[in-house]
Amino acid sequence: MPYELSPEEARVLGALSEKDMMTPEYYPMSLNALTNACNQKTNRDPVTAFDDATVRDALHLLRDRGLAAFVSEAGSRVEKYRHKLAERFNFTRGEQAVLTVLLLRGPQTAAEIRDRGSRMAPLDDLETVMHTLERLAAREPDPLVRLLPKAPGTKEPRWAHLMCGKPVYQPQQEAQHATGAAPGLLERITQLERELAQLRAEFDALRAKVEPLL
């Protein structure tokens, strides 16, 4: 793999990409805004508590890798930051959205990627998501995502990004949680997670519109 990002780099890169796609009016981002974006409680797994120094260090590493850039705007003394995913990989908007969701939330099913990524790009159905994932998995010379082995007791396999190298996968740990619940309960939990993700997306969009008025 060309990249072996640290978890901090992956979170910073994902946060930059998400805000670029969802709230372009606040992009590029200041260090304070980016730190808050990394640590927000919604649409993040795991939830982090980075300080500015951690985010700044990750930004310098991403810049050295050609994945981020520092921006000085005329009339502003605050340095801002942007990602370079589109330039580096020539992504479609859908490809960028899918990779962003994986960077921010780790391994997910295609349905979860669709629900969360549709906030950023038109991912109308599972077929669209699958085609996008397959393109990312088939990229030459290095794939950017891969399909993980299906864990015992689960209905759907998960996809993971490869920006941090080969993903660490522990199917037995997932199986202990999955096999302890009835299939109907698992389906209900999955549905509730999807509904919660949608509510969080709607809340984030509403907050982005209201904050400038406060």
Image: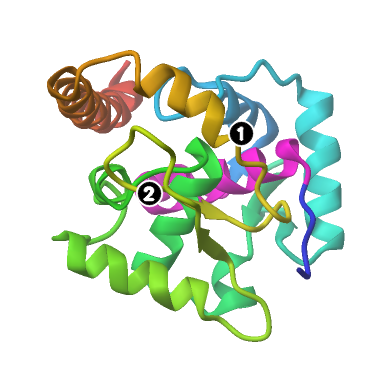
User: Relative to 29, does residue 88 appear above or below in the rendering?
Assistant: below
Give how far across and how far down residue 48 sits, in percent: 63, 20
The disc at residue 34 is 1
Q: Which mark is residue 191?
A: none
Q: Quadrant of the N terminus?
A: bottom right
Q: Residues within 10 Å of mark 2 (few under 14, many from 20)?
A: some
In this view of the protein, which residue sits in the foreground, 140 or 18?
A: 140
Q: Residue at x 52, y 40 (%)?
A: 106
Indicate left or right for 123 with 172 as reference.
Answer: left
Give the foreground label among 1 and 2: 2
In this figure, which residue is indicated by the disc labeled 2? 157
Counting from the top left corner in percent of width and height, residue 99 is at: 48, 57
Indicate the amino acid at tag 2.
Pro
Tell me the crowding category of disc 1: few under 14, some 14 to 19, or many 20 or more residues within 10 angstroms, Cα based: many
Q: Provide the secondary structure element on which disc 2 rests.
A: loop
User: Residue 42 appears in which quarter of the rendering?
Assistant: top left
Q: Residue drawn 69% across and 33% down?
A: 31
The location of residue 56, given as percent across then percent down, is 81, 36
Classified by dominant secondary structure, the portion drawn in magenta counts as helix
Q: Find the magenta span and give its range.
A: 6-28
